[in-house]
Image (cartoon, grey):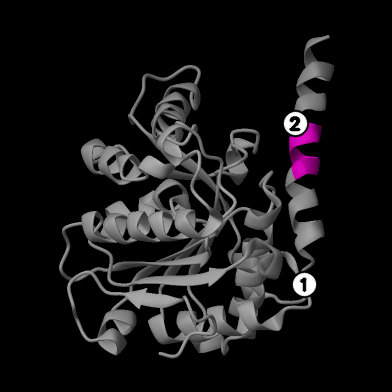
Amino acid sequence: MQLHNPGAEIFVPDDTPEADAISRTNVLGVGCHPDDLEILAYPGIIECYGDSDKWFSGITVTNGSGSSRTGLYANYTDEEMIQVRRQEQKKAAMVGEYGFMALLDYPSSAVRDPANEVVVEELKTLIEAAGPATVYTHNPADKHSTHVAVTLRTIQALRELPSASRPAHVYGCELWRDLDWLPDADKVVLDVSAHENVAAALLGIYDSQIAGGKRYDLATMGRRRAQATYFESHETDVATGLIFAMDLTPLIQDPSLSVVDFVQEYINRFAQQVADMIQQLK
């Protein structure tokens, strides 16, 4: 498959022919930066891990050139960081047994530009070729603007696919903002208790981030554990790790829905739930 950017590539960990590797996909993750998939799409990774009949595949949209850096990486140029993070994402694809890993190599500015239709077209082409039943991406209430841009481009790409080619489920997962604020009835609760060692290995691959000054590995595992405990106040823990997501499928099924209005409804229900509890108890 011909990709748009000169530095873009499709990596297949097990050397299956590219077209076959793409088409065998059951679950697809679309992330912004190298290491985002291992945080937000871990439910899909672990669903397929070790199962020869199910394949998780990933798309990383940006090159990650703007990451924070200190220590060993303090004097790395943006281009050097791009190469380091590319190799880390490939290592993660090998450890996680991904079907394929597409590194699209866009600068963040290109993804944030709503007039840049190339990003949507490339996502559409890859997703249609992969034909996943489930897609994981960032949630539209994320705090990171480029994450939200990736979500919007992914939604647009999915909306432009023929109905028969759209996935049955699309989930927007937490990363730079937790989704514990969602009312429980609105949460998609994803149990990621299994294979904590694999989760730790995937996160630990990203030395450029960890040694570079951001302990995403500890923070991510800690958040999953905390949410498993704090999810139910009157029940014993039934999981050791939970990830929360928004169900974005209605936005794909009905392209006329406004993303802004869709997210605002979640916020309104949360605000009403808080107000109702205070009213009942004051």
Q: Classify mark 1: helix, strand or loop.
A: loop
Q: Residue at x 62, y 77 (%)?
A: 119
The part of the image, by quadrant, that contains residue 50 is: bottom left
> For this rendering, which residue is in front, 36 or 215?
215
**Looking at the rendering, which quadrant does residue 98 occupy?**
bottom left
The chief SS type of the magenta part is helix
Amino acid type shown at disc 1: Pro
Q: Secondary structure at mark 2?
A: helix
Q: Which residue is mark 2?
A: 273
Location of residue 132 with respect to 235 vertically, above or below: below
Q: Is residue 200 left or right of residue 40?
A: left
Q: Residue at x 51, y 56 (%)?
A: 33
Quadrant location, the C terminus: top right
Q: Quadrant of residue 177?
A: top right
Q: Is residue 20 above or below residue 34?
A: below
Compared with 64, 142 (above or below) is above
> Magenta span has 269?
yes
- Indicate the position of residue 107 as horizontal and vertical percent values: 62, 65
Crowding at label 2, few (<14), some or many (≥20) Cα neighbours within 10 Å? Answer: some
User: Can the viewer see residue 191 in this picture?
Assistant: no
* Pointer 1 or 2: first along the chain: 1
Q: Position of residue 62 (x, y in %)?
A: 55, 64
The residues tagged by marks 1 and 2 sit, at their Cα atoms, a distance apart of 34 Å
Which label number is shown at residue 92? none
Which quarter of the figure is the N terminus placed in? Answer: bottom left
Span colored in magenta: 267-273
| Kind of residue sitting beneath label 2 | Gln
At a point 59% along the width and 33% down the height, the residue shown is 180
Looking at the image, residue 234 sits to the left or right of residue 21; the answer is right
The residue where tag 1 is placed is: 114
Left of 90 or right of it: where is 111? right
